[in-house]
Every structure is written in structure tokens, then in C-alpha cells.
Amino acid sequence: MNGYFVTFEGGEGAGKSSILANAASILSDKGYDVLTTREPGGIEIAEKIRQVILDKAHTSMDARTEALLYAAARRQHLTEKVLPALDEGKIVLCDRFIDSSLAYQGYARGIGMDDVFRINQFAIEDAFPDMTLFFDIEPSKGLARIAANENRERNRLDLENVRFHEQVYEAYHMLATQSPERIRIIDADQPIEQVKVDAVRELLTGLRTNTEEGEQ
Ligand code: TYD
């Protein structure tokens, strides 16, 4: 694995997806070989698992079932798409990964972050991200952005109450405190153009450090 693995994390309406697309195009322009993806990433098996998870009709889904399904989808996407790209030396920018499960299932759903970490560790083995960008915006503001965007489809998790999203937010901060080396906090409560600039700056710093470490 000689590429560079970056994950984008945050609550609803943090703007992750468009920031990720923008970062990818800037890095490509600079000559980097970039793969952008998001779980389930167009991997057929993972897509099918995801449909089961997010189906609005599945209101009876048990929290641990949900966590296991996310971990299963994650494993398939990782082995079919992410690891092969990293082996080819690519920079992989992935919208959501293990921290989403820790925050949403582990903390907000109340299963416990340690248990969710264990099943995810089984799923990803040692494929932890080299860097994680956490887009920090208070849930009430993020949710207001989503509400303003009529084109965005609501899924089962979007429909959770504000308290749930506040817990997700709290969990991301706890994770960032636990792993300050890996998780960088980006202030997402700024004009989107500024958030994009900040994200690219972090990425370039991480890539530079990675190259320097590789050369030593
Ligand atoms: P998606 O439509 O991809 O949302 P977003 O644009 O916010 O990334 O839906 C993903 C939803 O699934 C989102 O509400 C977060 C949630 N999720 C988890 O609860 N656990 C996970 O491990 C992952 C990857 C996502």
C-alpha cells in the first residue's frame, strides 16, 4: 500500500461531497493520480447492502444489524476499490469511512464506540486512513443547509431527530481529540469557497509530510 488514503467526515450538510470533488480536481491539476469514491462506491455487493440499510421502510432495523451491515459494505468497497488503488500508488479521497460508524452507530445509536470499533477493525484490518478531514459545522446549521436544498433526497438517517445529529457531532469531536494526528478539523461554518481552500491546504500538507517521511 503505497498510495495515500484520505477520508472525509462530518454530519449532514457539511458540504463534504462538493469539497471532495473540488479537492480531487485541484490535486489532479497538480499532477497527482487521484481516485474519488464514497461508500458504497459503485461496488455492486456494497450497493445492495446499502439499499437495505437506508430503506425508509426498514424502521425496525436493530442498531447492531445496522452497524454490521455498514461494516460489511465497507469491507467490500475497501477490498474491491480502495486497496487496489492504493497499491497502484493513487491518492484515494473517500467520502465517509470508519469514523462515520463510530459516530453514528457507536455513539449516536448508543451501541458503544469500542464495540463498533472492534467490528470495523475486523472489516478493515490495518487499512486506517492516512488522514481524515472532519468538516465541523453545528448540526442545526448543517440540517438547515439540507432543508434549503430541495434536490437532495432524504434517507433513513437524515430523518433522525436533531438530538441524534448533535450526538454525531459530539462523537466526531471526541474522535478528533483522540486522534489529533490523523483527524484534522476543518471549519465548515464558513463560505464554501473558503472551506475548499482550507481542505486543499490540509491535504497538500499531509501529502508533503508523507513524501518526506517516505524519503527518509
Ligand atoms: P449519504 O446519502 O451518503 O449522506 P451524506 O451525504 O451525508 O454522506 O447517506 C449516508 C448516511 O449514512 C448518512 O446519514 C450517514 C450514515 N452512515 C452511518 O450511519 N454509518 C456509516 O458507517 C456510514 C458510512 C454512513
Image: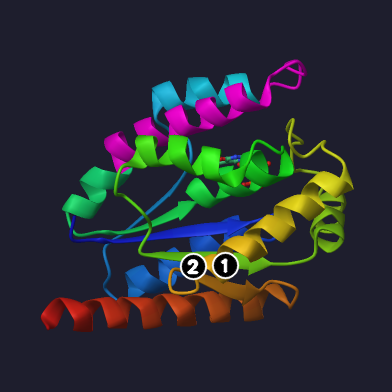
Name which residue lies at 31% across and 45% down.
82
**Image position of 194 with respect to 68: above or below:** below
Q: Position of residue 33 (x, y in %)?
A: 26, 63
The crowding category of the residue bearing disc 2, from other C-alpha atoms within 10 Å (few below 14, some 14 to 19, many at least 20), is few
The one of 64 and 30 positioned closer to us in this rendering: 64
What is the spatial separation of the Cα atoms under label 2 and label 1, in whole angstroms? 5 Å
Question: For the residue labelled by badge 1, is the local secondary structure a helix, a strand or a loop?
Answer: helix
The residue labelled by disc 2 is 179
Q: Is residue 157 left or right of residue 140?
A: left
Prevailing SS of the magenta stretch:
helix
The one of 145 and 62 positioned closer to us in this rendering: 62
Q: Is residue 79 magenta?
A: yes
Quadrant, the N terminus = bottom left
Quarter-of-image position of residue 182: bottom left
Disc 2 to disc 1: CB gap under 8 Å: yes
Q: Position of residue 106 (x, y in %)?
A: 62, 42
Q: Is residue 166 magenta?
A: no
Name which residue lies at 47% across and 33% down.
71
The residue labelled by disc 1 is 176
Residue type at tag 2 = Ser
Q: Is residue 60 visible?
A: yes
Quarter of the rendered structure image containing ligand 1: top right
